Image (cartoon, rainbow, N blue to C red):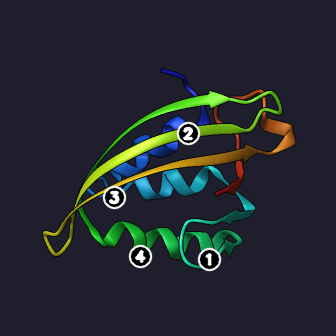
């Protein structure tokens, strides 16, 4: 298993359902001008990203992700993941996806870099 910014991001996504400090740590991983493309429309900027994730995490009762991360030649992080979840209304779901994340140029060599683009 890798130890990258996106690995910690996915760990925190599972913890955010239970741990009140996890969303703040997850959001701290995003650059102030980050863009997230996970919902119907992209969200841009720290306030919009924070609002998106607050609503997203509130919809879950429990989640568990499994994933593999690859660091591509251009330093883009690629995570192939699956998630089993219980929604807040007790509905059970599964989701599988591939996401790509880019770190800021200044922090690419650091494992705790700032995410600037999630899609």
Report the Cα–Cα distance between label 2 and label 4.
23 Å
The residue that label 2 is drawn on is 79
Q: Mark 1 points at which residue?
A: 48
Q: Residue at x 78, y 36 (%)?
A: 107
Looking at the image, which residue sits at the far right? 105
Contact, mark 1 vs mark 2 (Cβ under 8 Å): no
- Where residue 76 sits in the image (x, y, percent)? 74, 38
Q: In this view, does 68 lie above or below 83?
A: above
Of labels 3 and 1, earlier in sequence is: 3
Q: Are marks 4 and 3 in contact (CB under 8 Å)?
A: no
Question: Element under label 4?
Answer: helix
Q: Where is residue 52 in the image (x, y as percent from the top left)?
A: 51, 74
SS category of the residue bearing label 2? strand
Q: Which residue lies furthest to the top in this view?
A: 1
Residue placed furthest toward the left: 90
Disc 1 and disc 2: Cα gap in Å?
23 Å
Which label lies toward us, 1 or 2? 2
Q: Which of marks 3 and 2 is in front?
A: 2
In the image, residue 85 above or below residue 68: below
Marker disc for residue 20? 3
Task: Compute the Cα span from label 1 to label 4.
Answer: 11 Å
Q: Measured from the top left, where is residue 55 in percent x and y?
A: 41, 76
* Residue 65's disc number: none
- Do callouts 3 and 1 mark residues in contact (Cβ within 8 Å)? no
- The circle drawn on residue 55 is 4
- Mark 4 / mark 3, whichever is N-terminal: 3
In this rendering, position of residue 105 left or right of residue 95: right
- At x 59%, y 49%, the residue is 99
């Amino acid at each position: 298993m890798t130890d990258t910014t996106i690995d910690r991001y996915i760990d925190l996504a599972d913890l955010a359902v239970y741990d009140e400090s996890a969303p703040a740590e997850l959001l701290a991983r995003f650059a102030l001008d980050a863009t997230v493309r996970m919902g119907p429309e992209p969200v841009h900027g720290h306030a919009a990203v924070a609002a998106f994730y607050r609503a997203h995490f509130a919809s879950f009762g429990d989640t568990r992700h499994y994933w593999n991360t690859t660091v591509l030649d251009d330093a883009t992080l690629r995570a192939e993941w699956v998630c089993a979840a219980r929604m807040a209304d007790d509905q059970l779901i599964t989701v599988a996806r591939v996401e790509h994340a880019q770190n800021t140029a200044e922090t690419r060599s650091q494992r705790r870099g700032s995410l600037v683009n999630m899609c």
